[in-house]
Amino acid sequence: MTQTIVESKTKTAVIGFDQPFCVIGERINPTGRKKLAAELEAGDFSTVEKDAVAQVLAGATVLDINAGVVYNSNPNPNETEPPLMKKIVELVQGLVDVPLCIDSSVPGALEAGLEVAEGRPLLNSVTGEEERLEEILPLVKKYNVPVVAISNDDTGISEDPDVRFAVAKKIVERAADFGIPAHDIVVDPLVMPVGAMATAGLQVFALVRRLREELGVNTTCGASNISFGLPNRHGINNAFLPMAMGAGMTSAIMNPVALPIGPKKIAEKRAEVEASGIILPADMDDEAFCQMFGLGSTKPKAGKEMEAIRAANFLTNNDPHGGDWIKFNKPPAAAGEEGRGRGGRAGGRRRRA
């Protein structure tokens, strides 16, 4: 069985057909996040710290690190991104022990991350473009790391799945010329939005099967691409991920965290409830209110996509005896009961995590 080994200083993540699905947390990325981009330019890493910890607690196996900020003070990413990547990698690996995925379109930023990363990070990414192959594959070989291979080339992104497969095959073959084995290539076959292309789901499932059976490689994707532009994106993502896993996909770059419900939404729901004549207890706090009326939580927690992935792991016997599923669904300990043994007695024998 093909296994791609990704390591931190103390922890190993194995991406493979016979392994639990690998969740690569995507939140440490300023793209489309103006607040985070402004913080990073100002040297404020507080959101990075919160996102790193929250994603690991939600079940991320690997954390993607992207430092792609376009500074207002200096719009040249070749100058600004390498030192920022180095800083973020050092910061995150000092906070959490999971392996990292170093993500950039700037070769200098990729190498800056590789230079300070502990263990064996995943590199994101190489494409089939000739210039990119010549820049990135030597880095992969030099640092002996696995790499995400994205199925587009100099002609762009093809809507033809046969073309995307051919690009993936080309990358695997070129990597072999550098002495990089197929098990260190994780192919992203490119998920198209199903709202724009009705066959997008069917295409990626067929591509993943071909990549597994004909090239023997592991696969990944940007999971939320499938639902782009549609209502109830979580509902689509929750169906897509187990289906992709069933087709043989072994990892995804995604957000494992259900973001907290903000005070504005809570206030609106309270007003709606009160207008309907429901009398709420005077001492009901926001968290209890959110739980009662199905709003979510005021705290970051594992999202519905993580629930779908854990269920699929159990059903495919990649969660033997359902241990992870049971732990995930175990009610939180009541206040004051943490650390108590069976029957609520203090000092009881604790179960190892």
Image (cartoon, rainbow, N blue to C red):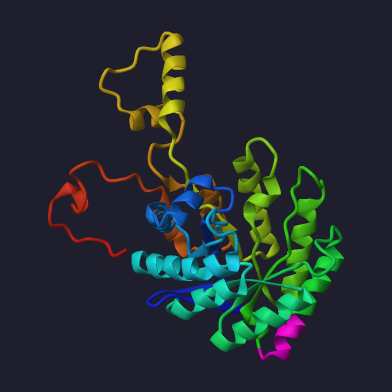
Residue 301 locus on image (x, y percent):
42, 46
Residue 259 locus on image (x, y percent):
47, 43
The answer to whether 67 appears left or right of 137 in the picture is: left
Is residue 72 or residue 235 the one in the foreground?
A: 72
322 relative to 105, above or below: above
Point 78% across, 52% down: residue: 200
**Quadrant of residue 316 in the image?**
bottom right
277 relative to 203, above or below: above
253 relative to 285, above or below: below
239 relative to 119, above or below: above
Is residue 52 or residue 85 the one in the foreground?
A: 85
Point 38% across, 53% down: residue: 50
The answer to whether 149 appears left or right of 202 in the picture is: left
Point 46% across, 27% down: residue: 265
The answer to whether residue 300 is seen in the rendering is yes
Residue 78 locus on image (x, y percent):
59, 69
Secondary structure mostly seen in the magenta stretch: helix
The answer to whether 170 appears left or right of 264 in the picture is: right
Residue 167 locus on image (x, y percent):
80, 72
Q: Which residues are magenta?
A: 172-179
Q: Does the stretch in magenta take in 45?
A: no
